[in-house]
Image: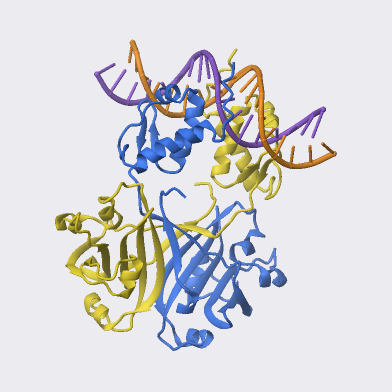
Chain colours: A blue, B yellow, C purple, D orange
Amino acid sequence: MTRTKQSGEPIYIVIAESLRNQIIDGIFNPGDMLPSENDLAEKFSTTRITVRKGLKSLESDGYIYSRPGKGYFVSTPEYKSFSIDFTEANETSRIRKIDLVTPNDEVAGALHLEADQKVLEISRIVTKNDLPVAYDLKYLPYDKGHPTIEREIQYAVFPEIVAAKTTPFAFYTTLSLTAESAKESLARELNCPVGVPLLVMRRFIISKDSFLGYGIRYMTGGFGPITGKSGVFKR
Amino acid sequence: MTRTKQSGEPIYIVIAESLRNQIIDGIFNPGDMLPSENDLAEKFSTTRITVRKGLKSLESDGYIYSRPGKGYFVSTPEYKSFSIDFTEANETSRIRKIDLVTPNDEVAGALHLEADQKVLEISRIVTKNDLPVAYDLKYLPYDKGHPTIEREIQYAVFPEIVAAKTTPFAFYTTLSLTAESAKESLARELNCPVGVPLLVMRRFIISKDSFLGYGIRYMTGGFGPITGKSGVFKR
DNA sequence: AAGTGGTCTAGACCACTGA
DNA sequence: CAGTGGTCTAGACCACTTG
């Protein structure tokens, strides 16, 4: 008795596209209620479950939301969330130094360290076209029980370094961006004039119960901008 | 005959949490195949559809992916995607000037304008504790057919300004961040020394077929950092 | 051929919202 | 109260991957 829907697009996608287009074209506007699941099931000659699949895909894309007992409504889009991609994976860089150091206040605070605890400092110069474009510092709490293997460090990029100490889904990272001017020591490393404006990125690697890593990166104009994209849009 | 599952958590969430915990604890690792839908249905005394709901929620959270004909696999997490929140909605600011101007090359290029087309320039000073912390410039193509209402402009924030010209789901925005030093004209507006490093944010508002707006914002250290968060983590 | 995920049907009961 | 979305059952056929 099954109505074998065999043509190209799955019904639930047809439903989702139909509604999405009506939202983009302004036929349904933010706050408007959509037809109920039962109405849509009848209109598209299918069942509630298939209709729901379509609605849920629109919901997860941010176009609509549902209120139990009431219905589905068009979202008021938020333009405040941007997603930016940043990875060290495809960079060329060279290790400048690896050292066990006593952390300064910034690093000690970032990693929530005890008073006399030491940290591993990894400094690197990132290059583009053989010119230095970023100076990168990473700090890892020095753990006597699990001494870090320097071979690994040389080839790993940031989050992956600490992933070895835990499972890969047990931590997250944060990022903060500021503009600062190049101090003399930085200018020397980056081969640029003192006072040049640098884009500074600070990153934390955090697991449920501890601070696994802290990174500071100073980027010259040659590094290029950090770019992102916002929001709800048909890709 | 229905086995009335009436206790608190829905079965599909129990299934998802169970698998998620096994992934976080490293019992299942990236690349590992999970039990099949049928196996899980049997193990949790439910049906494939309920199992699928749980698996799909893990999939949309980035923990796993599915390959038709093969099975479900634990993802290799990506740490390169950060989400940052940025909105002008809660800022205090004052309009500095609104003008119809001939765009310079940067603006004309950003908005893909014809040679002699004019743009509306809105400049604003953002303040914190009565001190200027950002200088904000917005450019909107001047459209003779739909002259912009200045009253609206004074109170709207960026994406919402152009939303009036189209439907709210028909456009997206991009963002780019750099560090630049304060030129003299900027230093005057921001009441800061010439040469101070500024965080510069450029934004584009883009619809399917046209460029609706361009914004440049120069932020002093007083504005604070731009912050973000990455990745897959149990919220 | 056997197993997998992807889609779909035709029902069901529940908790919730609003008139 | 009737209508809504949330959850769930017990089947089905399909295309795909692997042996």
x, y percentage for residue B40? 67, 31
Which residue is at 22% across, 79% downward? B188
x, y percentage for residue A118? 60, 72
Which image quadrant for residue B33?
A: top right
Farthest left residue in view: B151
Q: Quadrant of the N terminus of chain A?
A: top right
Describe residue C5's horizontal placement relative to residue A226 as left or right: right
Of residues B3 and B156, the one nearer the viewer is B156
Which residue is at 54% across, 45% downward? B61
x, y percentage for residue A74? 35, 38
Q: Is residue B14 above or below residue A152?
A: above
Of residues B115 and B155, the one nearer the viewer is B115
Callout count: 0
x, y percentage for residue A5? 57, 27
Q: Is residue A187 above or below residue B119?
A: below
Which image quadrant for residue A19?
A: top left
Which residue is at 51% across, 70% downward? A108
Q: Determine if residue B156 is in view.
A: yes
Describe residue A14's horizontal placement relative to residue B166 as left or right: right
Of residues B127 and B100, the one nearer the viewer is B100
Q: Determine if residue A220 is in view.
A: no
Describe residue B204's horizontal placement relative to residue B143 as left or right: right
Which image quadrant for residue B155?
A: bottom left
